Amino acid sequence: MTIGRLLDATKELILEKGCASITMNDIMDRSKLSKGAIFHHVRSKDEIFAWVLQERLEETNKRFTAEAEREVKTFEGPLGKIAEGFAALEDGGDVTNKVLVYLLGKDGDLAVGEALERYYEQTARFSKQWIQSGQKHGVIPETVDAGKMGDLFVLISLGLSVRSSIPGVSADFTAPDFTSVIRKLLQPQTR
């Protein structure tokens, strides 16, 4: 419950003030948690921000897993659960995009670098697992290199997220295009 309150308060503050303007006092006030309760779980606001990224990833994985465990095994069901989050990748106001861009700007901070590395590795690991799950259920060809394809999807996702923070950029490649690329690269070709 404490972590949930901490994350909810932090996300609200990010939307209101942006990442750079938030202080630990703001988070304490908004979450109604004491300094000790917060610092029992984290060492800094940047660590909380990394949890915000992780939370979105875990939510996507839960949706995928629930769909993949359904009795009827299809490609479109699990893809749809993953693709539900693609629109957020293009939203510059999305909390996770704001956090990602903020943390990427803190390249000199070793702890932030480690958190981003863990986030990237977990995102790539989940992407690979999703592809392997499709292969196991016969809806993705065994010839697909799950590691390389998972990494490609992570790169595209991160690119869409970062691009969302650049004002005035006109996008030719969008979230629906991303879904289409996944579909073309992973679905077995019918003759």
Image (cartoon, grey):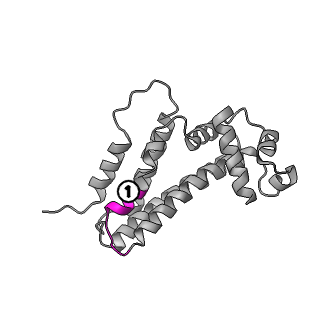
* Residue at screen point 42% across, 61% down: 147
**What secondary structure is found at the residue carrying circle 1?**
helix
Residue nearest the viewer, comparing 130 with 5: 5
Other residues around mark 1 within 10 Å, as few (<14) / some (14–19) / many (≥20):
some
Q: Residue furthest top?
A: 168
Residue 18 seen in the figure: no
* Residue at screen point 54% across, 58% down: 59
Residue 111 lies, in percent from the top left, at: 71, 48
* Residue at screen point 69% across, 56% down: 4
Residue 78 lies, in percent from the top left, at: 39, 62
Residue 136 occupies quadrant = bottom left
Query: Is 82 within the magenta?
Result: no
Q: In the rendered structure, which amino acid carries the disc numbered 1?
A: Gly
The residue that label 1 is drawn on is: 80
Residue 20 lies, in percent from the top left, at: 70, 33
Query: Is 75 within the magenta?
Result: yes
- How many marks are shown on the rendered structure? 1
Residue 54 seen in the figure: yes
Per the rendered image, the range of residues in magenta is 71-81
* Residue at screen point 70% across, 44% down: 10
Residue 77 lies, in percent from the top left, at: 35, 62
Above/below status of 38 relative to 22: below
Above/below status of 132 relative to 152: below
In which quadrant will I find the C terminus? bottom left
Above/below status of 140 relative to 48: below
Above/below status of 106 relative to 66: above
Q: Residue furthest bottom?
A: 71
In which quadrant will I find the N terminus? bottom right
